[in-house]
Image (cartoon, rainbow, N blue to C red):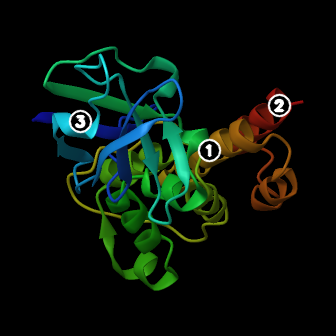
Amino acid sequence: MYKITGRVVVKESQRVLPGLIVKAYDKDHLYDDILGYAVTDLDGTFELVYEGKDFQELFESKPDTYLKVQNADGEDIFSTQDRFRFSPCQEEYFLIEIPLKNLPEEIRNMSVDPASIELIEQLLVPENLRKQQFLWQEVYGAVHEISKIHTPRGEQILQDVIKLEGEIQIAEGSDLPGVMSPEDTLKATAIEHLTEWTGQKYVQEIKDAIAGRESSTLYGRAMFYIQKQN
């Protein structure tokens, strides 16, 4: 009996990827034999077991293995075929690091911490902004987390942050930013990463959001980030 275990993660963030299909293959001269498959758990781990008869051919005592990762529809996302293992041990561990750019949009969105997304989405609801108190460290940490990796959902959230209107009700015990208000600090962070991700795509939206703020620190930073991408 042979066993393959491992974990599938996003290369850039090391965030785990659940619900993906991992298939093991024995590399052969004519065609590659499938040894088995498994689905990644909530923590991105998988385990598959296969028997020697699944790969044994004339003069072949051990498989030369590689793995393929597929989405729930069976579409190939990633493969280790270019670095397969010659005659591995009976128990093998694979850490599969998939670059973010290789992931479909729906899976890329999964790579962002859902708790961070939920917190900022709550903040962006006007009624919550007026009535609910937020701990500043958690709010800033959530925006920072969303900004780590360019995802379609993250891009939309940062657009919404730039358009934020009103004051955040800060909870007692918060460590407030020193230079700008909490609202301007979040907007500056959003503008910085949006311009890094998309260049000039949202310049007009940014200028609309900072209109009339020419003397503010936010305006100066926003213009710096915009000009940096020229």
Placement of 206 over or under 2, stated as above or below:
below
Q: Which of these two is toward me, 91 or 10?
A: 91
**Residue 189: percent from the left, percent from the top?**
57, 43
Label 3 neighbourhood size at 10 Å, few (<14), some (14-19), many (20+)?
some
Quarter-wise, where is residue 122 in the image? Answer: bottom left
Q: Which residue is mark 1?
A: 188
Q: Which of these two is toward me, 225 or 178?
A: 225
Residue found at x 35% / y 18% = 85
Whole-angstrom CA distance, mark 1 to mark 3, is 39 Å
Q: Are marks 1 and 2 in contact (CB under 8 Å)?
A: no
Residue found at x 83% / y 54% = 207
Let me know if residue 3 appears in the view.
yes
**Residue type of the residue flagged with mark 3:** Gly
Q: Which sits earlier in the primary sequence, circle 1 or circle 3?
A: 3
Quarter in which the N terminus is drawn? top left
Quarter in which the C terminus is drawn? top right
Placement of 167 over or under 230, stated as above or below:
below
Q: Which residue is mark 2?
A: 229
**Residue 4: percent from the left, percent from the top?**
20, 35
Q: Which residue is mark 3?
A: 6
Residue that protrudes farthest toward the left in the picture: 1
Residue found at x 44% / y 65% = 168
**Residue type of the residue flagged with mark 1:** Ala
